[in-house]
């Protein structure tokens, strides 16, 4: 990276914060714009780093990008830790549980697909899965062992990224951004010029870029946070993903006997209300997989809009002169934070971006797609 460029990062979720930390550590003068840093979809997340168990036929570019980012996660976490900020990475792996016969068939399809791709995932009986996680229900029909899919404490990570960015000289502006033009950012305090701008505003990105208008949409997700009580079973030792009569649910353990439940997904715009239906679905699904949760304390309910794209790939790359997109990460913002941050540093330094990012071209499928590709 040449000189000491001024970089604006619009959005302080995990993607924006990862970029801000990496860029400030590399010598950039970084300014982060967000009225509520770390309080969007990244705050309301399970923390799964799970490209393999998220995989499905037809989404091979998503799997490739996710695996590339997962390979970068240990070094990403170690670098944060060396600076004195623990991101809460868990290396315990993931299991997937199938509740009934139809769920087991679906899981078998996933297992066969992963086997054909040469990915590490072992299909086992329900009994074998319970030997791995004794708290699972006797009704579980089958399972998948995926040691390579990891997890991170999302809230610990967000705090670490904010502190690390500040420690490297980054500054935060808690004003909403109203407009991006070329390399300029307009907020309540006026317009400021930068050498480059990264748009990482999640579900709100479409409102700040004409190129992304209508192509990034909000997709509501809800989570519950639980805590074990005296006499109750401890949480699972690793992340448990499950299919319960066709509906997905996940249980992600946290330190101190906490457990995060999630997997609801609605087309509900920017609504952040937690619905009774969402709470009921999550509790019912989780209890059928891990019955001991019925004795846990419910300590928090929360909802936030994720930034969804049409094809489940994010939008990564140059939108207009001096403005780069890093948005549309859907359910995979935490997973894709390292590869996205490394891509931004590559763009700023005039270097080749990481493997898998080319498929995430932000102008794919847009009105300017053909023209853009002819130029490159």
Image (cartoon, rainbow, N blue to C red):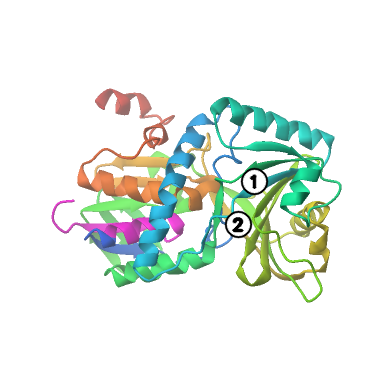
Q: Is label 1 in a helix, a strand or a loop?
A: loop
Mark number for residue 311? none
Residue at horizontal 78 percent and vertical 37 percent from the top: 103
Question: Relative to residue 246, is residue 251 drawn left or right?
Answer: left
Q: What is the count of numbered marks? A: 2
Where does the magenta region start and end?
1-23
Residue furthest bottom in the image: 230
Q: Quick check: is 2 in the magenta stretch?
A: yes
| The quarter of the displayed image where residue 368 is located | top left
Residue at horizontal 20 percent and vertical 53 percent from the top: 195
Q: Mark 1 points at which residue?
A: 267
Residue 374 or residue 332, whichever sits in front: 332
Image x and y of residue 311, in percent: 52, 34
Residue furthest left in the image: 3
Judge whether residue 166 can be spotted in this image.
Answer: yes
Judge whether residue 36 can be spotted in this image.
Answer: no
Q: Name the residue under label 2.
A: 46
Residue at horizontal 41 percent and vertical 69 percent from the top: 85
Residue at horizontal 20 percent and vertical 42 percent from the top: 350
Spatial CA distance of label 2 from label 1 is 19 Å
């Amino acid at each position: 990276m040449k000189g000491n460029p001024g970089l604006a990062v619009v959005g302080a979720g995990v993607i924006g914060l990862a970029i801000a930390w990496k860029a400030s550590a590399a010598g950039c003068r970084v300014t982060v714009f967000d009225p509520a840093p770390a309080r969007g979809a990244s705050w309301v997340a399970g923390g799964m780093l799970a490209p393999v168990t998220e995989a499905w036929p037809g989404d091979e570019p998503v799997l490739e990008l996710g695996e590339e980012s997962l390979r970068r996660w240990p070094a990403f976490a170690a670098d944060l830790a060396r600076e004195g900020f623990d991101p809460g990475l868990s290396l315990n792996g993931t299991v997937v549980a199938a509740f009934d016969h139809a769920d087991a068939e679906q899981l078998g399809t996933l297992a066969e697909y992963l086997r054909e791709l040469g990915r590490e995932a072992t299909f086992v009986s329900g009994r074998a899965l319970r030997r791995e996680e004794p708290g699972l229900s006797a009704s579980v029909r089958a399972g998948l062992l995926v040691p390579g899919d990891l997890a991170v404490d999302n809230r610990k990570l967000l705090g670490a990224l904010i502190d690390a960015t500040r420690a490297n000289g980054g500054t935060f502006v808690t004003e909403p951004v109203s407009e991006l033009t070329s390399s300029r950012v307009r907020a309540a305090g006026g317009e400021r010029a930068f050498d480059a701008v990264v748009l990482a505003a999640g579900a709100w990105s479409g409102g700040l870029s004409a190129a992304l208008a209508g192509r990034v949409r909000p997709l509501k997700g809800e989570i519950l946070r639980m805590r074990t009580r005296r006499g109750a079973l401890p949480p699972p030792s690793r992340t448990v993903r499950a299919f319960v009569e066709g509906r997905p649910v996940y249980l992600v353990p946290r330190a101190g006997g906490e457990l995060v439940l999630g997997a609801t997904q609605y087309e509900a715009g920017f609504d952040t209300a937690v619905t009774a239906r969402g709470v009921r679905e999550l509790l019912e699904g989780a209890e059928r997989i891990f019955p001991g949760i019925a004795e846990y304390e419910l300590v928090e309910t929360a909802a936030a809009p994720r930034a969804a794209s049409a094809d489940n790939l994010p939008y990564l790359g140059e939108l207009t002169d001096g403005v780069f997109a890093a948005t549309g990460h859907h359910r995979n913002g935490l997973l894709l934070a390292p590869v996205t941050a490394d891509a931004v540093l590559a763009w700023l330094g005039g270097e080749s971006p990481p493997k898998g990012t080319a498929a995430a071209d932000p102008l794919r499928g847009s009105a300017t797609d053909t023209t853009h590709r002819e130029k490159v």
